[in-house]
Amino acid sequence: MTAKTVSLKDGKKILIRPLTLRDLDKLMEFYRALPSEDRRYLRVDVTNREVVSQRIRLAEKGNVYRLVALDKDKIVADGGLELSGEEWHKHQGELRVIVARPYRRRGLGTVIMRELYFLAAEKNIERLVAMMMRPQKAAQTICRRLGFREEALLPDYVKDLSGKTQDLIIMFCDLKDMWKELDHLYSDSDWQRCR
Ligand SMILES: CC(C)(COP(=O)(O)OP(=O)(O)OC[C@H]1O[C@@H](n2cnc3c(N)ncnc32)[C@H](O)[C@@H]1OP(=O)(O)O)[C@@H](O)C(=O)NCCC(=O)NCCS
């Protein structure tokens, strides 16, 4: 993907582009500014610089594609498409998105999901997977809205960063179904017309 500027619902312009190792400081600032309630359900401790830089290096090797959204020079959202590389999973990709609080409910999460969708289509992925802990309600709503359905609920399967066990929800969406929802969302909204 090359860099592109998108408009949020309120007309705010945001740059979306692939993440690189040069973004490490900015990314750390973004993660450290997240409220602990948001960090609690992430898979890794994103306040640990070594963990984050290792993640970026992994993304530079392929199989994991990471995008960032910037307001001027500040990272305001981060998204990823992870392909496992294993034969039995190779038609699947896992989506992850996180948006800074002041930028939520402005369409940014959906825009990033759409960009990750395009990336998945380029990589011939047939099915997208999203995993979240039960308290991540906004993630469940946005995924349902984009055509994902809940396929499994694993009780007490994971621990959040505070050490509390949580149910894991696994949602799937076939790529062609997600396109139907995205196409409908964008063609119906004023937001699309003002882009
Ligand atoms: C999930 C998340 C990425 C959504 O980002 P966002 O930029 O607010 O998403 P959008 O503005 O595109 O919202 C799209 C739709 O999702 C639904 N939605 C989003 N946040 C919601 C919330 N808090 N409560 C209910 N519905 C919500 C709404 O239907 C919304 O459309 P609307 O605003 O027109 O009603 C964001 O809340 C987040 O970063 N959460 C924490 C991290 C996380 O859970 N990531 C997902 C892991 S896969």
Image: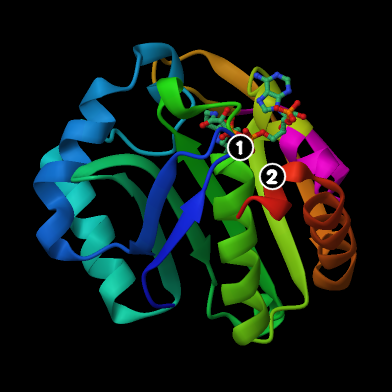
Q: What element does badge 1 sit on?
A: loop
Label 2 belongs to which residue? 191
- Sequence-wise, the earlier of marks 2 and 1 is 1
**Type of amino acid under label 2:** Trp
Q: Is residue 30 left or right of residue 16?
A: left
Residues shaded magenta: 142-157
Instruction: Report which quarter residue 72 is drawn in.
Output: top left
* Other-residue count near label 2 (Cα within 10 Å), few / some / many at <14 / 14–19 / ≥20: some
Closest to the observer, 99 or 60 = 99
**Type of amino acid under label 1:** Lys
Q: Looking at the figure, which quarter contains the N terminus?
A: bottom left
Marks 2 and 1 sit apart, C-alpha to C-alpha, by: 5 Å
Which residue does the image show at 54% across and 49% down from the upper left? 96
Contact? badges 2 and 1 (CB < 8 Å): yes
Q: Looking at the figure, which quarter contains the C terminus?
A: bottom right
Q: Is the shortest distance between ligand 1 and the CB of mark 1 under 8 Å?
A: yes
Label 1 belongs to which residue? 9
In this rendering, the answer to whether 127 lies above or below 167 is: below
Residue 156 falls within the magenta-colored stretch: yes
Q: On residue 139, which mark appears? A: none
In this rendering, the answer to whether 160 lies above or below 67 is: above
Q: Is residue 32 left or right of residue 162?
A: left
Q: State the image coordinates of residue 129 (x, y, percent, origin top left).
A: 70, 56
